[in-house]
Amino acid sequence: MIVNVQVNAGPFSHQGANTAYHFIRAALERGHTVQRVFFYADGVYNGNDLTVPPQDECHSVARWSALAEQAGIDLVICVAAAQRRGILDSEEASRHGKLCANLAPGFRLSGLGQLVEAAIDADRLVVFNR
Amino acid sequence: MPVNNCLFILSTPPHGSAVAQETLDVILMYAAFGVPVTLLFIGDGIFQLKKNQSTAPLQLKNFSAIFRAMKDYDIDNVYADESAMTARSIQLADLLIDVTPLDAQRQSQLIESADLVFNLS
């Protein structure tokens, strides 16, 4: 089954993104396909490369990047939600005259159309809110 | 998965969180892809549809006008929890667009018949 995922929760304040990660790992282990994770609303903070948690805590941003590399999952961050919250790739950063870009490896910025496409292409779209 | 009917449940007031505004963007995108969209307003979500919203004193964007554009996106199926309207003394005439009030049983039927149920809150 193709299971795509939408994450609306940030990496720290709520459990949703953590649950989404473990859900995806479990789905992959059961032989399902996860093509894309779409990050929306506060979920865009999961792609903030400036996140530096204490060493004895899970580095959830690095964990997403590793998942993208290992499993070939397309991690898409909503560009409009990201700009509001200060998550920029190098192209957006230079376009807006900002000194630094902070999109973590393995993520890319794109539009909401990618969410609709992920829903249409999948057998299930599972949404994690908080 | 052919998405023939996407139901959005809107349960938050228009301001106080970004949920209403960001859900609206998702709704319009699904509609732009030609996915049939149904809206169900429950709880404080009904406040999103109130006429005469004034957001300027709060320096917030008034996005309520977007609801008037729903018809251009072929979004005609708009429902509301009738008990939520009653509890908040909201009449149909207070609302920006045409809404069909539903009782709890009809709402559960609506949810059951949807291919995709979206609730950002």
Image (cartoon, rainbow, N blue to C red):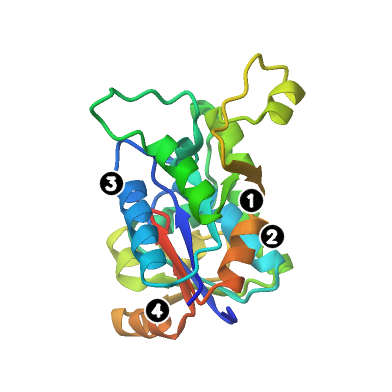
> Secondary structure beneath disc 4?
helix
Camera-side residue: B45 or B56? B45
Query: Residue A79 location, x and y as percent?
Result: 63, 41
Asked whether residue B50 appears in the rendered view, the answer is no
Q: Name the residue at 44% across, 40% down.
A: A42
> Secondary structure beneath disc 2?
helix
Mark 3 touches mark 1? (CB < 8 Å): no
Mark 4 touches mark 2? (CB < 8 Å): no
- Tell me: residue B88, above or below residue A122: above
Residue B69: mark in rendering: 2
Circle 3 is placed at which residue position?
A: A15
Q: Chain of mark 3?
A: A
How far is mark 1 from mark 4, CA to CA?
26 Å
Tell me the kind of residue under disc 4: Ile
Let me know if marks 4 and 3 both belong to one chain.
no
> Secondary structure beneath disc 1?
helix
